[in-house]
Amino acid sequence: MTEPIVTDYLLELSDALADVPRSTRVEILAGVREELEGLGQDEAAERIRSLGDPQFIAASAREDVAVPSEAPEPQWRSTVAALLVMIGGVVVPFIGWIAGIALMWTSRAWSTRAKVLATVLPALGGLQALIVTTIASLFETQSVDDTFRYPGISEFENPLVPGFHDVIFSVPLFGLSTALVVGIWLLATANKPQRVTGSPAWGVIPVAVGSLVLPPAGWIVGLIFLWTSTVPARTKAVMTTVGPVALILGVALTRVFTEEPVVLVATAIAVPFLTSLVAAILLLRTPTAQARS
């Protein structure tokens, strides 16, 4: 039976060798698989450390086969793509932004992670505005306890709390504002080298922190960092599932005792964060414990 650490390493190596000629890629994968076959968890981990990072193996393979580099992309292409993402949705609503996203995805100026973030962040900005205003609208109507001073009035609308019309305007406003920030970021990072790391901390920490700082948009951004990193598949699966499961169970248990909106909202934020944080700590300690043993 193949150890999970071996399977994850071979998958990462296969991805890193994606642009290497097929014959060379098959030869390297077969050789590495043969070296790791039959080893136990600890032996496999030690052998993988000696083999090195898959990105370095792929880089060496490219040098050996002399893979011809692609012609440089015109500077105007990435600039136009970033500008369309930034203000295309204002000039030609929605269609202009879609054109910028399409041009960005056909460009080589950004990494896959940057492209995914640039695509989903404006939508997350609108989603975050929708969630915040919807939660705030739960407190739009307040009860009146002093019936002597306000006869015949049992409740009133709080003018400081956003209503339905505020939701309608805030969603596109936040989406366009986020697109503006994303476009500026794309202009600043075009054709810059992107750092790829296999450190588990780079994958799990953004998920835990994002779930607290800006739920749920921050949690989704953390998942993007997680799934575009080279951390093991088991780590990705655990960090993706613990938050939603904790949210469902936490809210369900809280509703048994109270229906107060403030308590339910606090539970929906605190429980997934604490669960993700504990999972992150345990996952970060596991590689360390294996390395010491």
Image (cartoon, rainbow, N blue to C red):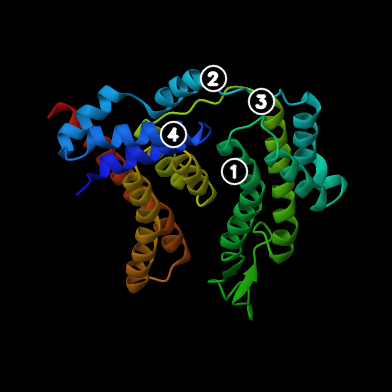
For the residues bearing labels 2 and 1, Cβ distance under 8 angstroms: no
Residue under circle 1?
116
Near-viewer residue (4 or 39) = 39
User: First in sequence: mark 2 or mark 1?
Assistant: 2
Amino acid tagged 2: Ala
The quadrant the C terminus occupies is top left
- Dot 1 falls on a residue whose secondary structure is helix
Residue under circle 4?
25
- Dot 2 falls on a residue whose secondary structure is loop
Total marks placed? 4
Q: Quadrant of residue 248?
A: bottom left
Left or right, residue 124 beside residue 239 = right
Distance Cα–Cα, label 1 vs label 3:
23 Å
Identify which residue is drawn at 45% across, 38% down: 15
Near-viewer residue (3 or 152) = 3
Badge 1: how crowded within 10 Å, few (<14), some, or many (20+)?
some
Number of the front mark, 3 or 2: 2
Distance Cα–Cα, label 3 vs label 2:
12 Å
- Dot 4 falls on a residue whose secondary structure is helix
Left or right, residue 274 beside residue 114 = left
Number of the front mark, 3 or 4: 4
- Is residue 116 at all visible to an observer of this figure? yes
Which dot marks residue 70?
Answer: 3
Residue under circle 2?
66
User: First in sequence: mark 1 or mark 4?
Assistant: 4
Badge 4: how crowded within 10 Å, few (<14), some, or many (20+)?
some
